[in-house]
Amino acid sequence: MDSLLDKWSEAALTSLGFFWMALWAFVLGYLISSIIQVMVSRSEMRKLMGDDSLKSMTLGSAFGFISSSCSFAALATSRALFQKGANFAPSIAFLLASTNLVIELGFVIALFLGWQFVVGEYIGGIILILLAWLFIKLTNPAELIKKARQKKSNSDHDHENDGHAWSRILDKEIWSAISQKYAMEWQMVWKDVLIGFTVAGIISAFVPTAFFEWLFIGAGTSDPGFWALLQQAMVGPVAAFFTFIGSMGNIPLAAVLFGEGVAFAGVMAFIFSDLIVLPVLRINAQYYGWKMALYIMLMLFTCLIATSLLMHYGLQLFNSLPDQSQWSSPADRDHFQLNYQFWLNVISIVASVWMLLKWKRQNENSKHHHHGGGSSQPIINSLCVIAVIWLVLGVVLSLF
């Protein structure tokens, strides 16, 4: 019984620690999304990312790199770009770049996994964008894109101002509109964030690493064949589905997988999979509809498997694959240190409180704020209540 209670406490603290690690990225991403929605006009965005040319794809990738953030925040920002007239392909490029071509993510990967995985993340991220671009061109989902834009027109307000001059960025009126958008973004995804991070902590604490060894055929062998590598690359996204903690938080678990013998391709597929898990699928369904959400999931699943295999054999060609025999699972990370992340989170909390108070003072009866999932909402609401109770009791247990 004591062991169960200890695990419960560990799971709750892990969930909170993962969220604390990603908090500033959430705030930054949603702030960027809100500013884009208020300030950027459709005509402006069409000029920059209005087609699927190489120039638009490059701009989408560059904007994503600049606004690097966690997957939830990147989803909101990429949706804002799409709504403002950006072509679907550059919007996807932005999404992939902002979750993979991330400076802070590279530091974490280097700390837990080594330079080879940093190379895999950055070069692989570019390859992933190129393959997604090719996938979109070959499948040509014009009807899905059309319906996704229609869904946007039905769920959002078309009478809103179509952008503002950037010289007005400091106007009170502008920041009132930005604060409203910021609050709406949090209303959209807070349930998925709560459930996703809670489940991540539970799996991290309760599921033994032997389970992941069982999932990956050929784990622990020095030279798995192509079919074993393909299976590991396919199972990587499945493992990520059940251990989702965001693009930053899944790196320690990726290191555990690598320490248990999972090949480079399988680990990279796991790392690349933060955009095809259930919470992200639900958010994409709310943004674009279920058909488009499933299309995006299939596209990313196919492209990330190909990317992971290409990076594995590319490093093998140059005899640069990391040596698993010298590897061991990392120790549990202390998430609540007094470091740069702490101060970034303090600034983010202050900024969020200011934005939400500003939004609240407007006293707007915003009936359009619910982007709900119909009949699934009672289930989601129940899971949220269970998650809150689980976390609160877990923290209480940690005090004794």
Image: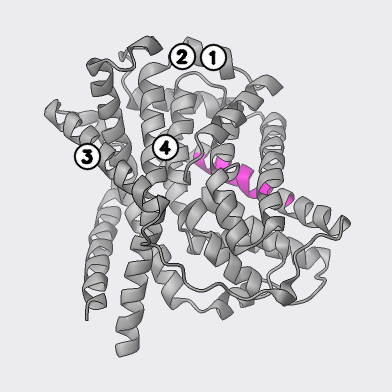
Q: Which residue is mark 1?
A: 46
Tell me the distance, in whole angstroms, between the alpha carbons under discs 2 and 1.
6 Å
Q: CA distance from mark 4 to mark 2?
A: 20 Å
Q: Measure the alpha-carbon separation of dots 4 and 3.
A: 16 Å
Question: Measured from the top left, where is residue 16 in percent x and y?
Answer: 33, 61
Q: Which residue is mark 4?
A: 29
- The residue that mark 2 highlights is 42
**Most distant residue in the front direction:** 339
Q: Secondary structure at mark 3?
A: helix
CB atoms of marks 2 and 1 within 8 Å: yes
Can you give x and y, in whole percent of width and height, for residue 92 in the image?
57, 34
Marks 3,1: beta carbons within 8 A: no
Does dot 4 land on a helix, a strand or a loop?
Answer: helix
How far across and how far down the image is residue 187, in percent?
A: 28, 40
Residue 67 in sight here: yes
Residue extent of the magenta highlight: 293-306
Local secondary structure at mark 1: helix
Crowd band around label 4 with a 10 angstrom C-alpha radius: few (<14), some (14–19), many (20+): many
